[in-house]
Image: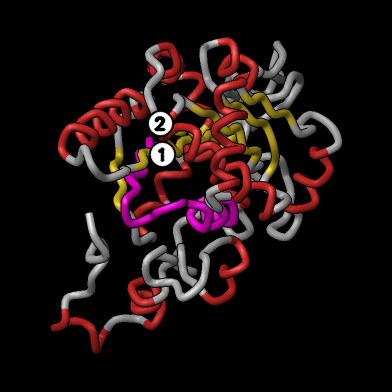
Amino acid sequence: MALDIYKINPEFRDIMPQEIIDLEEKATWSVKMEKARGIKELPQSKELLEEHSLCAGCPEAAALRYVLSALPVPEETVIVNSTGCTSLMFPHIALHTVHSLFGNQNAVASGIKRVLEWRFPDKQKDVVVLAGDGATVDIGLDYTLQSFFRQEKITTICFDNEVYANTGGQESGMTAKGQVFKMAPTGKKFEKVPMWELAKTSGCHYSVNLTASAPKQVAKVVREAILIAREIGPTYINLYTPCILEIGLSANEGLGEMKDQDKGRFEFYKHVSPEAEAYLAKCKEEGLL
């Protein structure tokens, strides 16, 4: 793992689009930044190619940029993703990524973390799971919870768009009660699964539920979750990134939808265990936060 993660072959460099070159030269590697990297550097840095594969205005694209900008040491980070809309973005970033089978991302991440600890005992390697609600809470719920039960030192981030968005619009366990989709015409019959509460009950030392409407808040939560996972145990972030296509909004209405839900179903929730609270205080003293 090094800064050569994303490197353009010199023989093809002269025909590469500028955004590809920018991704190599301006990715927010922590050791290449002259000052502390973070959310404020987004206008000058490159985390994601502009011509990515998501729909125009998709909140997931913005959320991914916030997450990547908040990684403590991106060049020493492995992101494990799963099949879904989220997986469409990962060929367009400059980080170590592993694409798992649909739902088993937390099992894969657990194995990667253990191998990294064995292979690099003197160097900190962060493992972050980033998957949708279908992979995290429906198809992959067993793998997700078991990683919490085992106290695996990984961070799980669920991009919760409340629908199986890239397969036609089926409801998921995270869909709000009563919601109608093209392939769920009678509406959801039961309440949304409160995964952030399940995470707390299942042993997560840090569990947060929020929207991607506030970049600074997202970045703060991501950084705290990863630092806690390094030393204490599993952490979970439930991040609302609505599928504007499936709920009938235009490309510029995603932010408004998230801001509306900040006061409703996604009112900020945060659980921090006593051990994690003490560790965060230590991190602040050391300037890590």
Instruction: Give whichever of 66, 189 is nearer the camera.
Output: 66
Residue beneath label 2, please?
154
Please say if 95 is above or below 24: above
Residue for point 51% across, 28% down: 235
- Secondary-structure class at tag 2: loop
Quadrant placement of the N terminus: bottom left
Establish if 80 lies above or below 143: below
Residue, disc 1: 128
Q: Amino acid at mark 2?
A: Ile
Q: Of 1 and 262, which appears nearest the observer?
A: 1
Magenta-drawn segment:
61-83
Q: Residue at x 60, y 26 (%)?
A: 207
Q: Of the residues under marks 2 and 1, which one precedes in the sequence?
A: 1
Q: Whole-percent x and y of residue 231?
A: 42, 31
On the image, the x and y values in percent for residue 127 come to: 36, 38
Query: Alpha carbon of mark 2 to alpha carbon of mark 1: how far?
Result: 6 Å
Q: Which residue corresponds to the image point at 57% horizontal and 55% vertical from the top-left?
A: 66
How far across and down, in percent of the image, does residue 116 sit?
A: 22, 37
